[in-house]
Amino acid sequence: MVPCPYCSELIDTGLSSCPHCQSQLTIAPTASQAHAPAAEAAPPKGNSTVMIWVLVIGGFVVTGVCGVGILIALLLPAVSQAREAARQSQCKNNMKQIGLAMHNYHDTYGTFPPAYIPDSDGKPMHSWRVLLLPFVDQGFVHGQYDFDKPWDDPANLAVTRNTPVVFRCPSAPGQTNTTHYVFITGPGTCFEGAEGIRIPDIEDGTSETILVIESHDTAIPWYEPRDLSIAELGSSAPTTGHPGGFNALKADGSVRMITGVSFDQLKALFSPSGGEVVGEH
């Protein structure tokens, strides 16, 4: 007995039609077919292919993410160094602009600007940085500034609230109204008082005499008639955010990064006519 392929009722083998459903049996089922085990269903090929691609793509994604993380970790120091190099370059350019402005001031008035203009009592009233404004493309601010009033008068504070970019080093932290470029003042320097120095008075040579230095920790408002004295400098080089040293503007208009000099050498560089032998710096 075998099942009918149409109605599944058991029928004898070798019949040409099913006695139950009357269906014609073109090929009568045999006993061997009836008892043959059903073939095990094969897994769909399409699903396997999709799974393989998911695993492959997932592997690439994981590898890519890890690779990007490693690449970023490797590049960060280089990016940081490149940014600091750019800031150092901008700082140096600022000092070059100040140097050019000081020489233009000298051409106009016959001396470099004094550290300050005093009031009737000899007290510092206006800074050299304010005097330089027309020579650093800040003529409008200079025109608004009232030289008949002290630097900290509310009228002048309103004019000077925006710091000219040329007076700030981009590597330096601190308040945005402070400057990072100062004179070294006091006995034996180019700026002993309220008088400006002439180039002929720099007997040690303009290439061997410093006019302006970079210092990041002085916290002096750019318009305040105050700088850094020899006594305040102490016995060490000024502090900056640059690795290795600080920028200095010399009387010839050149800017150098000063590194590895002793304090005695620094004092010699600040002196315009001491006759000291400075050596390499």
Image (tube, rainbow, N blue to C red):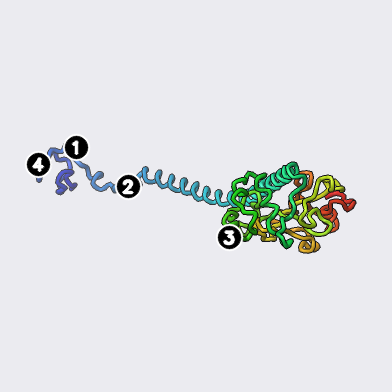
Task: Identify whether 222 is placed above or below 86.
Answer: below
- Residue at left 85%, top 58%? 264
Q: Identify residue type, mark 3.
A: Pro
Query: Mark 1: few, some, or many residues within 10 Å (few <14, many ≥20)?
Result: few
Report the Cα–Cα distance between label 1 and label 4: 14 Å
Relative depth, front residue between 239 and 14: 239
Q: Which mark is residue 22?
A: 4
Relative depth, front residue between 183 and 28: 183
> Residue 125 vs residue 267: left or right?
left
Marks 2, 3: nearer the viewer: 3
- Residue at left 47%, top 46%? 56
Quadrant position of residue 228: bottom right
> Residue 138 vs residue 212: left or right?
left
User: Sequence-wise, which precedes: disc 1 or disc 4?
Assistant: 4
Q: Identify residue type, mark 1.
A: Ile
- Residue at left 76%, top 63%? 232
Q: Which residue is mark 2?
A: 41
Q: Which residue is mark 3?
A: 154
Relative depth, front residue between 253 and 192: 192
Question: Does residue 188 appear anywhere in the picture?
Answer: yes
User: Sequence-wise, which precedes: disc 4 or disc 2?
Assistant: 4
Report the Cα–Cα distance between label 3 and label 1: 114 Å
Report the Cα–Cα distance between label 4 and label 2: 32 Å
Query: Mark 4: few, some, or many residues within 10 Å (few <14, many ≥20)?
Result: few
Q: Identify residue type, mark 2.
A: Ala
Secondary structure state at the residue bearing disc 1? loop
Query: Mark 3: few, some, or many residues within 10 Å (few <14, many ≥20)?
Result: few
